[in-house]
């Protein structure tokens, strides 16, 4: 038996009320999570930079004078200062508009689409919301919070790498723009080695030209020479998975958010179904009103 329009509208109102209720809960969970995340990011970023400067590139770091080392360390702290306010801006209205390049936005979107934790398909980027009125608004709000978290962390990684390159700790064989794209393109997940939040790249360097044909032929047969063309570069790559794994309390908070996001997906699915039923019921009523034997 088909539902009446009144029954359908009641169900729509119930789902809209439920979405506002979940929003209030998620808003509080995100705020606490983001406050803790900002502290954890700062701590783990410093550990990663320490690893780069003392374990991976100690000779390069030692080339800096005391003042240069102090200035570099101060710059790293300075880059971390606005983290919490940047994170929390995404749980307010209006939410910040992404300022990333088109390439960064595409790669971030791909990361979100592939994120099994919370897929947010068919959501328009240019929609603006001033409050949560229905499950679609809630989905858009959640999407922008998640997108904001990843973009802020990604931008911080890039800023720190630029500072390390300016100080000649990370080699300049790889242009900063290509380094940033490599960080963005890396698949998500835990780091494979023993150094969290650090990405290692293998790049092919230009081979030194020779006018001596015999010497060039010998070099082509020399395996050592071939291997010398490959340069290993390590860089900062803050990963949300690494950060949460190293902070048990943060992992617990993320799990609480995941549970609410699962509810959001179910509410949205039910809302889309009832909206379809509403459209069909209205169309049937409209047909009957204009039909004449």
Image (cartoon, rainbow, N blue to C red):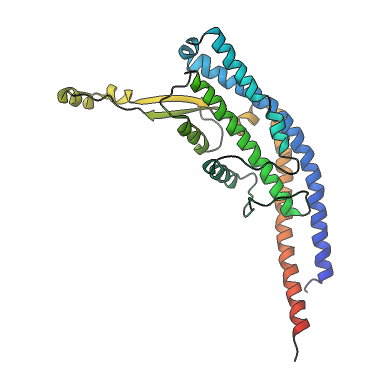
- Closer to the camera in the image, 199 or 132: 132
Residue at image x 68%, y 29%?
A: 83
Q: Residue furthest left?
A: 214
Q: Is residue 239 visible?
A: no
Give 244 or 112, whichever is nearer the viewer: 112
Residue 282 lies left or right of residue 244; in this view the side is right
Residue 244 is situated, as x and y percent measured from the top left of the image, at 65, 31
Q: Residue 225 vs residue 3: left or right?
A: left
Vertical side of 271 occupied by 244: above or below:
above
The percent position of residue 21, horizontal first and vertical second, equals 82, 48
For the N terminus, the quadrant is bottom right
Residue positioned 81% across, 50% down in the render? 20
In this view, 83 is above or below 269: above
Count of residue discs: 0
Q: Quadrant of the C terminus?
A: bottom right
- In percent of width and height, residue 175 lies at 44, 29
Residue 79: x and y in percent read 63, 24
Q: Residue at x 60, y 29 (%)?
A: 156
Q: Is residue 71 above or below residue 288?
A: above
* Residue sitting nearer the eye, 151 or 44: 151
Residue, far bottom: 293
Res 102 quadrant in image: top right
Task: Confirm whether residue 74 shows in the render.
Answer: yes
């Amino acid at each position: 038996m088909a539902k009446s329009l009144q029954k359908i509208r009641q169900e729509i109102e119930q789902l809209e009320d439920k979405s506002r209720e979940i929003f209030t809960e998620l808003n509080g969970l995100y705020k606490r999570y983001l406050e803790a995340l900002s502290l954890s990011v700062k701590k783990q970023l410093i550990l990663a930079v320490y690893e780069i400067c003392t374990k991976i590139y100690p000779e390069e770091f030692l080339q800096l004078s005391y003042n240069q080392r102090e200035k570099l360390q101060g710059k790293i702290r300075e880059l971390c200062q606005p983290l919490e306010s940047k994170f929390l801006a995404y749980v307010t209205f209006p939410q910040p508009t992404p300022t990333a390049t088109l390439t960064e936005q595409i790669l971030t979107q791909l990361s979100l689409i592939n994120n099994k934790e919370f897929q947010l398909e068919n959501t328009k980027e240019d929609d603006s919301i001033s409050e949560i009125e229905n499950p679609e608004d809630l989905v858009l709000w959640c999407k922008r919070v998640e997108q904001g978290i990843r973009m802020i962390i990604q931008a911080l990684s890039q800023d720190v790498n630029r500072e390390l390159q300016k100080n000649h700790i990370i080699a300049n064989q790889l242009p900063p723009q290509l380094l940033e794209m490599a960080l963005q393109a890396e698949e998500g997940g835990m780091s494979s080695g023993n150094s969290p939040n650090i990405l290692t790249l293998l790049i092919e360097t230009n081979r030194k030209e020779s006018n001596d044909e015999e010497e060039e032929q010998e070099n082509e047969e020399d395996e050592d020479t071939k291997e010398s063309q490959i340069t290993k570069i390590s860089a900062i790559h803050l990963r949300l998975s690494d950060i949460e794994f190293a902070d048990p309390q943060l992992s617990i908070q993320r799990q609480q958010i995941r549970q609410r996001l699962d509810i959001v997906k179910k509410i949205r699915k039910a809302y889309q179904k009832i909206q379809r039923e509403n459209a069909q019921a209205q169309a049937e009523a409209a047909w009957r009103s204009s039909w004449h034997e």
